[in-house]
Amino acid sequence: MKVALVHGKYFNSWEALGLGYIGAYLQARVRDVEIGFYQGCFDDDETIITGCQDSDIAAFSCTTPTFPYAVKIARALKQLNPGIHTVVGNYHPSAVPQDCLVNGIDQVVVGEGEAAMLDIVNGRRERIIQGRTMEFTELPWPNRELIRNERNIQVAYDDNKKRITSFQSHRACPFMCKYCLDGHFKVLYGNARKAPMRYRPVGDLLDEMQEVARRYRLDLMKFSDPTWNTDVDWVIEFCREKIRREFTVPFYPNMHATICTEEMINLMAEANCYEIAVGIESGSPKVLKQIAKGTTVRSIRRCVAWAKKAGILVRGYFIIGMPDETEDDLRLTESFADELEMDEYGFSLLCPYPGTQMYDADKYRSVDWEHADEYSNDFWNSNHLANQQLKEWQRYLTEKFKNKLTWHNRVLNNAIVK
């Protein structure tokens, strides 16, 4: 059995950890399986098509902007090898599975992919297959050699002069953010109101982090979790064990501002937390309440202050264009961004991805998603501001904070200037 795993093409490359887990899971459970891996950010179309064409199965991991790319490659493979079985999974197929059953795609995986891919390799062929939730105790570490993790690390080094890679510490998210696929509808978990949270055993996580840090000579370790600090006790346990092990390589997580204590932040600093990324989104109390994230201006201000006091760098993310946002709300956001005096700022434009509460199939099913994401789109309007006005605010804020922009905003701003 020959299986090809393909990670999509996007301007930003990141580790294909999901495919790394799937590949390792298959290798542990299927005899004589041969697994290939390709990534559109590094491998050109010809290399991917040539490498996959004699596979029995080609499986694509798709976000919404990368789904059209997967369809293009799948159709090219079908022309060369009509017998190849093509599968798509991850967030976009989980959000709109029926829409993904297009010419060139044989099967859609909804939810987590490890057990579902094992079933597919063993012959299961329903057009839509529901993956089951996986426990960390049954998952091997992701196969980083398979996904050629060194390439991503080299990109990080070229951009930041730091060797960086990511780790997964838990699965699912308890929050209900209306603009997020992990939020209100929780598309990987059957639109469950309460997602099945699973926390990775701290010892196992740190064992992998130490091994990978040694093998790849890491300067910084990030977490792929949308929100890392969903349980204060787990964070404290992680930090205490990292300190006990005298494991000093710094780390960098995404943080929810409300799920914080000063003790937790101080312990993170002692465990050598280098930076935190906080989803601030808005400086307007009205907007923060409407997006159902569970943060307030007060909780954000407190979290940022604790981190700065502890010597941890702070990156803040803002979203422009929440449905009921007005120019007065955006002025509050600008003022709040000034007040917080963070080390890095990111400004994105709300994108109504399939699977979010903002998605309207009648309006957006025909959108060219390959050219639309949270950094730019030509169709989203808030209830008070047109698309062009939202873009003008995004340009204004990125220009105002140009000396402290996140990598993504810097890359896109440079591309616009050129």
Image: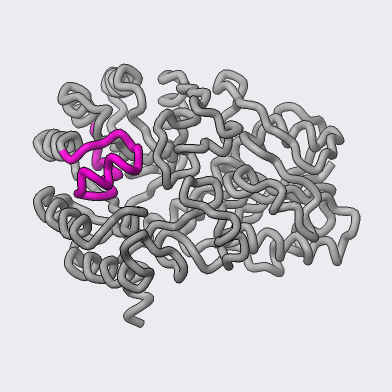
Quick check: 348 above or below 311? below
Give the residue displayed 22% in from the left and 70% down from the top.
Answer: 396
Quick check: 13 above or below 196? below
* Residue 289 part of the magenta segment: yes
Q: Quadrant of residue 205?
A: top left
Nearer to the camera, 198 or 249 = 198
Q: Give the range drawn in magenta.
A: 272-297
Question: How far across and how far down the image is residue 215, in percent?
Answer: 46, 39
Give the residue displayed 24% in from the left and 40% down from the top.
Answer: 274
Most extreme residue toward the front is 383
Q: In this view, does 25 lie to the left or right of 229?
A: right
Q: Is residue 319 left or right of residue 267?
A: right
Say if residue 198 shows up in the picture: yes
Q: Is residue 356 left or right of residue 5?
A: left
Q: In which quarter of the image is residue 126?
A: top right
Give the residue displayed 27% in from the left and 47% down from the top.
Answer: 287
Q: Quadrant of the C terminus?
A: bottom left
Most extreme residue toward the bottom is 418
